[in-house]
Every structure is written in C-alpha cells, then in structure tokens.
RNA sequence: GCCCCUGUGGCGGAAUUGGUAGACGCGCUCGACUCAAAAUCGAGUUCCGCAAGGAGUGCCCGUUCGACUCGGGCCAGGGGCACCA
C-alpha cells in the first residue's frame, strides 16, 4: 500500500472510471426521488478562475451527497456563450467570435473535468449553438404571439464612433468605454418583453421563496418597487390644441392643498407639442437631452425648470391656479411623466421651489397648534396631522390619503392606483454575437414573425469586424429576405437578443432537450423547480428576475406549469487575495512583489481581478496539489456566503489534510472490541456532517470531519476504530471524492464510493449518557461537575452546593435561589 | 438621502430555543525524530497575572438568576437602490 496519496494518478484514474460508468448521468425516468442541483453556468471567457472553482465545488458536494442519500440527481453544466467579449476579441485578435468562444469552451471544459465534478456532461449545452438559440427564437415567437413582446421607441446610450448602443455600465464619465467618444442619448426602435405585466406576481412570489436569502428577496422587492398612490387629471386653464389636460401620479395625495406648481417631463407629449411652436421651449428640451443616462450623471445634474407660462387648475378649487413647468428631473417612464410639487413636504420640490421663488406651504404638522410654523431648511416628510387643508384638517396622513382618494373617485377626477418602478425589459442589442431576433420587417405587413419551420435563424459566418457597428446590418445579403406573409420586399431584424434571454431558460433545457422543440413539458416539470441554485450575488436582480419572469411567462402561455424556477437559492462569496503595489502605486503580482527592488506595500485583500494582478490560476494549483486539496480548501474555514481569502498556507493545509486522511483511512484494520466513546462520536458526526452539507454550511462540515479524524487518531485500535476509519471515507466522499474512491478501492470494497449509500446514524448513540454540568454562582462559572444524563434537579442542586468552589464564591452569603437546568447547569444565586 | 447586512483571539471562524465563549483550521512557541531540512508526531497558544484570581464577543444603557444571542441608543465597515413623484 502506498504511503502517500498520489493525486495526479488518482484524479485521472477515477475521473475516467466515473465517465466510463456514466456514474453521474441523470435518468429522466428513474423512480428515485429527483433532485436538481444547479450552479450558474459560466461565460466562456478563456479560463476557469477560482470563483468558478468555489461555486462548482459547493454544488458538487451537494449533488454527490444527495446521490448518496438516494436521490436521482440532475447536475448539469453548460456555457453562457454569447456576449460582447467574443466580439471584442474578434476586433482585437482578428478571430471569429465563434471560433474564439468554442476554443474557450474546450479549454474550460477540460479544466472543469480535472476537478472531478459530478456533472452530467451528456446534457452540456452552449447558448451560441443554433441547436439552443433556435429553440429560444421559437419561445420568443410564442411570447410574441401571446402579446408579451412589443416594439417601441426608447432612449439609449449611443456611441457615435463605434455606432452601437452601450449599456449604462459601459459609459464612463459620459464617454464610450472603448471609443472615448461623447455618448449621445438617442431614440431607437427596440424590442421589449412585458415584464411589467408580471410585476405583482413577481413581487408576491418572493414571499414563497423561503429558501432564498432575505437579502436577495429584498433587493428584488426594491427593484420591482411598488408604490401605492393616486392618479388624477389637471386641466390647463387656457387650453390649446395638444395641451388641454394631463394626469399626474402622487404617493402623497394628502398633501394636495400644499401644491404650488405642476411639472411635466421634457419628453411629455404636452412639452413636445409646446416645443413645436415655441423655439425657447424647444431649446430647453434639447438641453435636457445632453449627457448620458447614468446614475452618476443624473446625480450631479442641476435641477432645471422651464416655466411654460401655462396654468393648471387645482382639482379641488376652480379658482386656484398653479404654474406649469417643464422640469428635467421628471421622468417620462415613471408614473405618468407629470407631477405636482409640494415644497413643504418633499425635498426635491422644496429645492425647486426655492430656486424658482414658489410658495412653500405647510399642510402637515405635529399638532394643530403648529399649523403656522414655517418650513425652513428642508422639507418635512414625516407623519402628523393635516393642517391648512380645508376638509382634511385634523386627519392623520393615512386617513387623509383615503379621504382624498375617496372624494376623487366619487367626483370622477382621479383614482387610487399602484405604480411600479420596474420597467419593461429592452432586449434589442445592436450586436453580432447574440441570438438573432426572429422577425422580418415588411414594407407592407410590418413586423412579421419568421415561420417556425424556418427556425433557427442562423448567424451568418462571413462577417467582418474591421468597421465599427453591427456586422449583421452591413452584411451584403443576410438581411434581405422576402416577407413570409406577402412575399414582398422585406428585411430581417438585425438586432440580436440580450444575453440575459439566453440564461432565462437554460435550466429548463437542461432538464429536457428534445431536438424538435425547446423542451418537453412533462419531463421538464418532473425536474423543476431547481432545488438548489448556487451563484454569485451579482445576479441577485437581473438574471434571477428575468428567469423568474420568463418562467411565469411560459406558464401563462401554457407551456410549463412552474411558477418559480429556483426553489432554493444560495449566493456564495468571492474568492479574494492580497494585492501588492510598488511605490508608484502600480499593481504587482505576488511573484513580482517578491523580486521587486524598492518598497512594496501589501494592499487590501480584494476580489481576484486581472487589473489588480492578484489572480491565482487554478490549473497549476490542481497540477501541484490535486483536485481534492483545492476542493477541500474551497470548503474550509470561510462560511460559503462570505469571501474566501486565497492563501498559500491554506492550500498547504488542505494538502496536508488529504495526506493525513489517506493515512488514517488506509491504515491496516486491526484491534477488536468496542470503543463506546468513539462510536458515539462517529454517529454524532454522521448526523452533523449530513445536516451541515444540507444547510450548505461546508465550513462546519469540514470542522466535523477534523474532529472525527482527531478522535480516530487518539483512539486505541478496536473494531470501532476500524469501522470509523472506513465510515470516514464515505463522509468525505462528497467533498474530496478522489481520495475517497482510492481508500474505498484499496480497502477492497466493491463498486464505487460515489454509489455507496450515506452512512446511517444510530439515534440511540446521538446523545451522551454522561453530561458536564456548569455550576455558576450569580451567573459566573465557578465549577463544573459530571452527572448522569437525566439526573434530577434535587441531585444536581445538592452536588452543586457541595462544591468547595461554590462555597468559597458565596463568601458566607445565604443561598437565595437555585436555578437548575437539567443536563446543562446549576446557577446558585446568593 | 432611503433600505439592508456585518462587527467574537495574531488570522479564518464555532457556539439548538438566552445556559461552560473561543469548537475546527491557519499561524506561532516549545519538545521528539533527523547530520540537517522537509514531512510527521507530542505539548501549549483570548488578554492581564508567578499564582490565586480578574477582565473579555465594536461602544453605552436596559431586560434576565444568567446575554455573542433579546430590546433601545451610538460607532465602524460592507452592500443594494437612488431625480421614483
């Protein structure tokens, strides 16, 4: 028997054995209970990084554990393969995005396989494969037919040099991140998915997602942003064509008597109508358009208003008129694109009123006596009672809201309503490397869906990236097609779908992948929802919200009877590493830091990133230490939801443990007889490791393993000790499967440990028969004593009072009270 | 500005319902083995103190026989949202 575990040999050997035996193939028609474990699929950027390793190791432990517990486990892997980096590579390296992507997939697949993950590779998919995106096009058309897809003008960040739309994240200080050109706001025709139709469902559904982190549920709740309020109509005092009346939305209808102005968005139809005949108005609106749409820019932008000269009539007093402004801070796509301003009780309105000399009227006060107290410095948005508000005077804020809504509805000039922050999902991208939108624009028939029998609409291969802009747009022939409906002149849609569409249903395709349709309803439903989904918190809103929407949309059109795609969600922390900088602030790699002449400062521990030069490539680490050591390190110490700091000591420690485990588990089985203490420890550990894996508390499971290993090493040879060593191998098998298989095989056990059942714990052995009782005096620990489990209160009290240390601590005071918690402690109060 | 989370040794972190704070790992110290090193094994390691003992879970206050855990108020760090009417 080898004295050292050789991971290089063992890893390759067992990986081959699992693959040849099809150990991790998930069977659709198994009669075992099903469990679907999924980690967020990677973008094939080039190489696997430590974040992937941590993510996939966690999922793998759970998948292997569930198999051992008797589940039929679906644990698939694929590639989120469309996206911009491929196009950037095409421009920089003159390779086709497809070629670049498929090469990366091959590399990364090989790297993942070397880590020994229990994946069903027969279900592997890549979103850039027409065999995948063709089905996505079919689903898109189903949603289109159901009225859940539409096209409208929308404002975007436009890079005039690269001639493309930029995401907000790609606009840096008002300039395109690649071209450096000043970004313009431009209106383009874009395709949208009606996610807002599901706003209420998506919000309500969060309540049922008990196995999601509260944090993520809260983030989604805020993102969906439900606001309850009132909508009502303002009449313009001297109307003119195109400017007669408009609706406003407010969450504070109670403050309606504090209004001192009304304002509309520069994009509001009335603003546009006024601009058509008034150059000054037009100039103001044009000014508002300057600059990007990023959060940072909006923040620094000055609040500006333009007095239209028009007046609106207060709905509750025909003689009361308010000035109408066009204001740059009123958004067209929230609420109704128009507001009324209450400077006394809204900070932004307060600033606006101060700037333009508008009245500030108090309508809410702490008490009726404070009705005339001026509002100074800032708006008061707290609770109170209504003042200076005619028939609302004396009411509380909530009562007043109800009263005013009731009156508006009775009189027909307004109504209670709910407004959402969530906007429809714009999915058009002016890019090549994405799923073509399967629509044909006909001069006569308009937007016509590509007939299903003509799917997939495949990306042309012969494209060039020498010129900026969308290669599909300037391809000589690809877009020229006859209209499917009238056979007249038509052209293909040249926009492609947002890559988040690709990831909105891949988990369904994993569960069922027929050739002729996106998925089989019954088969997909037999696996879904995903029992445990694991990934980074950076997807807390976008991907997870889109996938929830897509699933509900499919449910609405009758394709899949699942409302929530992910029953359990876990968001894991990042892998971090120390950073190094030289005296001029340049980032250094750890190797450079060691050999650098001159001062080197060791910086903060940060997320591994190329720019900070603190990445650690997993592959050489696996070469040196083996897959199990890397996996063990990924699971040890840090709670999985927190960041894990990569360190040389850490991986060394993991390596040492793998070797130590090998020695313990593979040593000759000798000795006979029972070791009751060890037996009890073994059975307790079986339970706690199982519970901790189930709860994804891997760091605690690892600690349990160490405790048992320590106990085995300290124990004298016995039959129990031999049994414990053997069981230990099964307990670590989900975490470090290669060394576990090796132990299993060398100890002559038949079959694979991966197929072995999880050990059963004997409930009788889970409790101690002797317990240590803490003895306190006035809540301070003074002594401990050992008593049989279940000893009576009187006995424990008597034992405690007999303790020398207790007597001393009492210093002669009489005992006033004795609290006894059976099997736990005695507290003497004196 | 609004919302949320976190704060425990030199470090990562444990601690059912309030019931022996510091499990487990890393690091460090001493010792064994060795010509030596690595590896391995043994002992120790919250702080102050020779000890007896005392203090101690970011800070202050409270509830309780008893608080890392519950309540109130601060401080620090991190995250999300943000002209949202």
Image (cartoon, coloured by chain):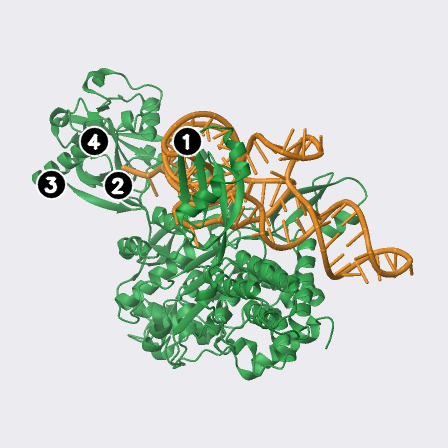
Chain colours: A green, B orange
Numbered disc 3: secondary structure: helix
Disc 4 to disc 3, how far (Cα)?
18 Å
- Binning the other alpha carbons within 10 Å of mark 2 as few (below 14), some (14 to 19) or many (20 upward) gives some
- Binning the other alpha carbons within 10 Å of mark 4 as few (below 14), some (14 to 19) or many (20 upward) gives many
Disc number placed over residue A78 in the picture, else none: none
Numbered disc 4: secondary structure: helix
The image position of residue A106, as x and y in percent, is: 60, 72
Disc 4 to disc 2, how far (Cα)?
37 Å
Q: Which residue is mark 4?
A: A397
Q: Which residue is mark 3?
A: A409
Nearer-N-terminus badge (4/2): 2
Quick check: A478 above or below A634? below
Numbered disc 2: secondary structure: helix
Q: Chain of mark 4?
A: A
Q: Is residue A644 left or right of residue A774?
A: right
Residue shown at the point (35%, 46%) measured from the top left: A222
Residue depth check, mark 2 versus mark 1: number of the one nearer the observer: 1
Numbered disc 1: secondary structure: loop
- For the residues beneath circles 2 and 1, the answer to whether they share a chain is yes
The image quadrant that residue A515 belongs to is: bottom left
Q: Is residue A659 left or right of residue A159?
A: right
Nearer-N-terminus badge (1/3): 1
Quick check: A360 above or below A249? above
Q: Which residue is mark 2?
A: A273
Residue depth check, mark 1 versus mark 3: number of the one nearer the observer: 3
Residue depth check, mark 2 versus mark 3: number of the one nearer the observer: 3
The image position of residue A367, as x and y in percent, is: 21, 20
Observer able to see residue A607: yes
Q: Chain of mark 3?
A: A
């Amino acid at each position: 028997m080898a004295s050292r575990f050789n991971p290089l040999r063992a890893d390759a050997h067992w990986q081959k054995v699992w693959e040849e035996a099809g150990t991790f193939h998930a069977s659709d028609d198994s009669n075992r209970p099903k469990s679907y474990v999924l980690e967020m699929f990677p973008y094939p950027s080039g190489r696997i990084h430590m974040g992937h390793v941590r993510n996939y190791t966690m999922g793998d432990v759970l998948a292997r554990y569930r198999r051992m517990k008797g589940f039929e486990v679906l644990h698939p892997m694929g590639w989120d393969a469309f996206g911009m980096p491929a196009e950037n590579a095409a421009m920089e390296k003159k390779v086709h995005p497809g070629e670049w992507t498929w090469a990366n997939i091959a590399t990364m697949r090989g790297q993942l396989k070397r880590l020994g993950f229990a994946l069903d590779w027969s279900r592997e998919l890549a979103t850039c494969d027409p065999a995948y995106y063709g089905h996505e096009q079919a689903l898109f058309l189903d949603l289109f037919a159901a009225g859940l897809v539409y096209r409208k003008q929308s404002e975007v960040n436009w890079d005039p040099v690269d001639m493309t739309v930029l995401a907000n994240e790609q606009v840096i200080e008002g300039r395109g991140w690649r071209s450096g050109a000043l970004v313009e706001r431009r209106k383009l025709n874009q395709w949208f998915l009606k996610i807002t139709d599901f706003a209420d469902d998506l919000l309500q559904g969060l309540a049922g997602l008990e196995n999601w982190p509260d944090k993520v549920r809260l983030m989604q709740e805020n993102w969906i942003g439900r606001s309850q309020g009132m909508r009502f109509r303002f009449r313009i005092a001297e109307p003119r064509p195109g400017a007669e009346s408009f609706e406003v939305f407010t969450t504070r209808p109670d403050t309606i008597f504090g209004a001192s102005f009304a304002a509309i968005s520069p994009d509001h139809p009335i603003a546009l109508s006024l601009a058509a005949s008034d150059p000054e108005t037009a100039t103001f609106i044009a000014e508002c358009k300057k600059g990007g749409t990023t959060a940072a820019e909006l923040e620094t932008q000055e609040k500006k208003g333009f007095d239209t000269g028009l007046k609106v009539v207060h709905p509750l007093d025909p003689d009361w008129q308010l000035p109408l402004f066009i204001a740059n801070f009123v958004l067209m796509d929230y609420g109704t694109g128009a507001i009324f301003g209450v400077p006394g009780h809204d900070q932004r309105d307060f600033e606006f009123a101060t700037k333009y000399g508008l009245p500030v009227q108090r309508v809410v006060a702490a008490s009726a006596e404070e009705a005339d107290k001026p509002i100074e410095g800032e708006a008061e948005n707290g609770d109170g009672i209504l003042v200076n508000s005619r028939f609302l005077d004396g009411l509380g804020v909530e009562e007043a809201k109800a009263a005013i809504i009731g009156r508006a509805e009775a009189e027909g000039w307004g109504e209670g309503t709910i407004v959402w922050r969530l906007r429809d999902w714009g999915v058009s991208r002016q890019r090549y490397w994405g799923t073509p939108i399967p629509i044909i624009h006909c001069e006569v028939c308009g937007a016509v869906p590509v007939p299903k029998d003509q799917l997939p609409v495949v990306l042309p291969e012969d494209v060039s990236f020498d010129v900026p802009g969308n290669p599909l747009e300037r391809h000589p022939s690809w877009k020229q097609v006859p209209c499917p409906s009238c056979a007249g002149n038509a052209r293909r849609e040249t926009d492609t779908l947002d890559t988040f569409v690709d990831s909105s249903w891949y988990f369904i395709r994993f569960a069922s992948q027929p050739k002729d349709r996106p998925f089989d309803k019954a088969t997909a439903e037999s696996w879904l929802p995903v029992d445990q989904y694991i990934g980074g918190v950076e997807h807390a809103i976008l991907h997870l919200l889109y996938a929830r929407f897509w699933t509900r949309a499919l449910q609405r059109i009758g394709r899949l009877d699942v409302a929530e795609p992910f029953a359990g969600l876990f968001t894991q922390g990042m892998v971090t590493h120390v950073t190094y900088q030289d005296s001029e602030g340049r980032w250094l790699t750890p190797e450079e830091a060691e050999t650098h002449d001159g001062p080197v400062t060791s910086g903060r521990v940060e997320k591994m990133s190329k720019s900070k030069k603190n990445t650690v490539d997993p592959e050489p680490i696996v070469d040196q230490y083996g897959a199990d050591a890397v996996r063990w390190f990924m699971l040890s110490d840090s709670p999985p939801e927190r960041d894990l700091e990569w360190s040389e000591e850490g991986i060394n420690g993991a390596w040492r443990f793998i070797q130590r485990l090998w020695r313990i588990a593979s040593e000759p089985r000798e000795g006979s007889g029972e070791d009751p203490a060890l037996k009890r420890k073994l059975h307790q550990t079986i339970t706690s490791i199982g519970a901790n894996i189930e709860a994804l508390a891997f760091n605690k499971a690892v600690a349990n393993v160490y405790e048992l290993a320590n106990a085995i090493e300290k124990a004298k040879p016995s039959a129990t000790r031999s049994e414990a060593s053997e069981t230990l191998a099964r307990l670590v098998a989900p975490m470090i499967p290669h060394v576990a298989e090796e132990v299993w095989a060398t100890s002559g056990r038949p079959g694979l440990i991966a197929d072995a059942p999880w050990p059963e714990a004997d409930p009788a052995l889970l409790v101690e028969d002797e317990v240590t009782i803490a003895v306190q005096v006035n809540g301070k620990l003074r002594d401990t004593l050992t008593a049989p489990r279940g000893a009576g209160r009187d006995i424990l009290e008597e034992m405690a009072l007999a303790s020398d240390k207790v007597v001393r601590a009492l210093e002669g005071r009489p005992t006033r009270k004795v609290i006894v918690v059976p099997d736990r402690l005695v507290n003497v109060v004196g």
